[in-house]
Image: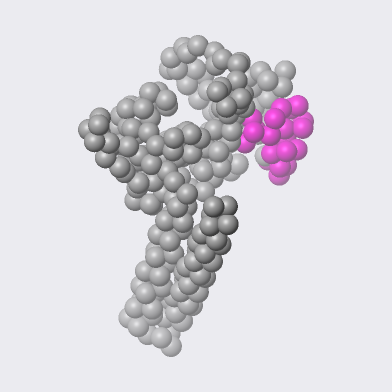
Amino acid sequence: MPGGRLTRQDRQKIAEGLAEGLTYTEIAGRLDRPVSTITREVARNGGPGGYRADQAQQATQGRSRRRKPTPAPPTVTDVHGRDPEAVHELEEQFTVMMVGTGLPRMTARVLTCLYVTDGGSLTAAELVQRLQVSPASISKAVGELEQQELIRRERDPRRRRDRYVIDADAWLRGWMASARQNTMLADFARQGAQVLGATTPAGTRMQDIGHFFEHVGQAMIQAAEEWRQAYAAKRTANG
């Protein structure tokens, strides 16, 4: 059934489809499954280049044995009229997409959790409870997100604990952090070209790298400033 768990035979067909160069949509069509199911399955088990049916089956069985039984999610809508199952599916897809950008899975889960929380902030204890993982896992994940400036930390004076916050400027801060990194790479490449000799093949290569990252960094900063101005104008217009 489309909503049931993947079987060993399903996983073998996924592996065959990947070997044939099929897209996730084409593989999902073969199995009569949602595309998100295939995307999630492959991402959890080595990615398109490393997916192996037998290993995926064993890993799934291992996770099933370790997983604590939890009650089935309620089918009633929440106070905003949302379907919890649809929200859960959204969280899974969002996490897979963030993993695809290079974030570790736990870091992506924490970021997703903050994004789909109406309040936009959670404590470490609340993240532990929602994600059912260890405090150490949460600590490592939020550290990585803070380093990339995708979240910020606020002190809750009433409860004397930190809250991790995601806001409208989160992606802007992360984008600017990436732009600064490109600028640093450009400076390093120019210095490297001087060490290697600007007229040598290696020095020329380093110069090209420097020009590329300088151009990309400046373009990113310009795009961010244009977005900031447009966003501010939109908020002012909406009053």
Residue at x 56%, y 15% (from the top left corner): 74
Residue 169 appears at what percent x and percent y? 45, 52
- Viewer-proximal residue among 37 and 205: 37
Screen quadrant of the N terminus: top right
Residue 121 appears at what percent x and percent y? 39, 37
- Viewer-proximal residue among 69 and 199: 69
Residue at x 56%, y 42% (from the top left corner): 97
Residue 183 appears at what percent x and percent y? 40, 70
Q: Is residue 33 magenta?
A: yes
The quadrant in which residue 132 appears is top left
The quadrant in which residue 155 appears is top left
Tell me which segment is drawn in magenta.
Answer: 19-39
Q: Does residue 185 lie above or below 61 as drawn?
A: below
- The answer to whether one can see residue 231 in this image is no
Q: Does residue 86 lie above or below 217 as drawn?
A: above
Residue 213 appears at what percent x and percent y? 47, 71
Q: Main secondary structure of the magenta part?
A: helix
- The answer to whether one can see residue 36 in this image is yes
Colour treatment of the image? one colour
Residue at x 37%, y 69% (from the top left corner): 184
